[in-house]
């Protein structure tokens, strides 16, 4: 009886602690993620599925580092950046974060526009209405209420998995492409790899996860349970992403159909997955957009106000934290206005936003790695050798890929005579 009670107590404690890393990972499959994975599946079939396995491992490593920083220091990432590197570096880090996150916020509202188009509902009415509802949840909620809302909405991500099964893929071919990499130096291929990296491991994730763990009051003693949170989140996010690849590869790549936009992507699933597939895709899109709008602007507000010492937190009132809520309001309502503009280049904008995030990611990672290897700050909880090798190697690889993408025309002209 005592063993059973002890087990139930541990399970209850785990469920209480879980949330920050799981939510951070799940929201990673936002509208930008759905669009990027869809575009990758449509253009390359299963050819880029191999990226999911190493990115799952790297996502786990980066989130584990974030967890240690949060539990040991009991401070948010932006707070640590200001304290350890000074105000100037903090300013530029926050500016790049705001720019990247504002682009992402716009893409989330684009997802809402697409979902309402599929449901044949007027976007000029429903997008601002839903934005107001989400903003109300943020300003009227405690951290616990916001977290519970996110976890409930996250259940709708199962729609992408269902759609992936409905298209009846060749599972042997899927498995082969997950395990065996197919590499190309074509600029379109490299750009897509960077976009996948940028949407799978975004800069905002580390700021949000660390701030929410601090806001939740977690301590070093909670590390074991938090590690489960990290592991589950890392697996779930790329598991869902894999099924988005599978669904869109079946609807476009294998039938030689051009990928034009997300609305067409949803409707194109009907011939291969049945009449309910577009609805499932749209429901998932609306869920991802709603979750990300609750998180991405929030992570930005947390980071900036924390970095410059302003009051912050969803448990504060508007009067207590005006800068925090002001940033939140600007990002949400400016995002609404831009997303409903006529003839807005949705797909191109989303793709570019993910590439920008991928290029900016090393800035955050390098600062994190310097922090987590600071013995004065972390004591015995500094990184081990393998975590350093993988994390530094990954940061260097992203920088090299970004430089190759930018300077590829020059490289081709110098080494291959313009071939």
Image: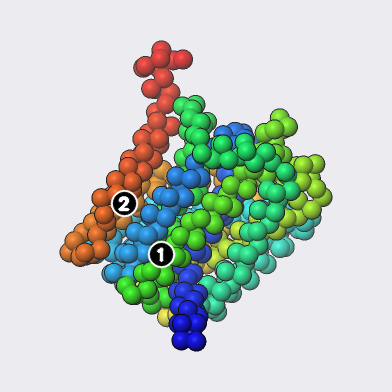
Q: Residues within 10 Å of mark 1 (few under 14, many from 20)?
A: some
Sequence order check, earlier mark of 2 and 1? 1
Residue 38 occupies quadrant: top right
Q: Position of residue 393 (x, y in %)?
A: 32, 42
Q: Position of residue 407 (x, y in %)?
A: 39, 28
How many discs appear?
2
Question: Which residue is the site of mark 1?
Answer: 227
Residue 68 occupies quadrant: bottom left
Q: Residue at x 65, y 58 (%)?
A: 158
Q: Position of residue 265 (x, y in %)?
A: 70, 43
Q: Is residue 351 above or below residue 89?
A: above
Q: Is residue 133 above or below residue 256?
A: below
User: Element type at marker 1?
Assistant: helix
Q: Which residue is situated farthest in the top direction here?
A: 417
Q: Is residue 330 left or right of residue 396?
A: right
Front residue (pair 283, 306): 283
Q: How is the image coloured?
A: rainbow
User: Element type at marker 2?
Assistant: helix
Question: Which residue is the site of mark 2?
Answer: 387
Q: Position of residue 284 (x, y in %)?
A: 66, 57
Marks 2/1: CA–CA distance = 15 Å
Front residue (pair 207, 339): 207
Q: Residues within 10 Å of mark 2 (few under 14, many from 20)?
A: some
For the question of whether residue 127 can be seen, the reply is yes
Q: Residue at x 44, y 65 (%)?
A: 228
């Amino acid at each position: 009886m005592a063993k059973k009670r002890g087990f139930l107590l541990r399970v209850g404690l785990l469920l209480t602690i879980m949330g920050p890393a799981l939510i951070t990972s799940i929201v990673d499959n936002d509208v930008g993620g759905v669009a990027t994975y869809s575009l990758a599946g449509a253009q390359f079939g299963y050819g880029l599925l191999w990226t999911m396995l190493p990115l799952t491992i790297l996502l786990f490593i980066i989130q584990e580092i974030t967890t240690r920083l949060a539990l040991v220091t009991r401070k948010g990432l932006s707070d640590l950046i200001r304290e350890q590197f000074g105000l100037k570096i903090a300013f530029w880090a926050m500016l790049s974060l705001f720019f990247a996150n504002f682009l992402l916020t716009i893409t989330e509202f684009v997802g809402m526009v697409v979902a309402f188009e599929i449901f044949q509902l007027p976007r000029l009415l429903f997008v601002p209405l839903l934005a107001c509802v989400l903003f109300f949840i943020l300003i009227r909620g405690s951290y616990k209420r916001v977290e519970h809302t996110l976890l409930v909405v996250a259940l709708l991500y199962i729609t992408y998995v269902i759609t992936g099964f409905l298209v009846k893929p060749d599972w042997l071919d899927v498995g082969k492409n997950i395990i065996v990499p197919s590499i190309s130096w074509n600029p379109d291929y490299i750009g897509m790899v960077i976009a996948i990296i940028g949407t799978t491991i975004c800069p905002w994730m580390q700021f949000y996860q660390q701030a929410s763990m601090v806001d939740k009051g977690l301590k070093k003693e909670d590390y074991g349970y938090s590690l489960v949170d990290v592991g589950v989140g890392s697996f779930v996010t790329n598991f869902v992403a894999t099924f988005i690849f599978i669904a869109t590869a079946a609807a476009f790549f294998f039938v030689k159909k051009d990928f034009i936009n997300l609305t067409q992507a949803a409707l194109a699933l009907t011939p291969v997955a049945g009449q309910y597939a577009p609805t499932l895709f749209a429901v998932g899109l609306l869920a991802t957009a709603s979750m990300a709008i609750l998180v991405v602007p929030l992570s930005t507000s947390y980071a900036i106000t924390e970095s410059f010492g302003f009051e912050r937190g969803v448990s504060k009132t508007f009067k207590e934290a005006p800068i925090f809520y002001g940033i939140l309001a600007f990002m949400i309502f400016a995002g609404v206005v831009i997303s409903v503009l006529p003839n807005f280049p949705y797909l191109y904008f989303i793709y570019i936003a993910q590439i920008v995030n991928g290029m900016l990611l090393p800035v955050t990672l390098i600062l994190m790695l310097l922090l987590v290897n600071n013995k004065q700050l972390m004591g015995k909880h500094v990184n081990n050798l393998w975590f350093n090798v993988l994390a530094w190697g990954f940061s260097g690889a992203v920088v090299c890929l970004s430089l190759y993408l930018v300077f590829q025309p020059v490289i081709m002209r110098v080494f291959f005579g313009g071939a």
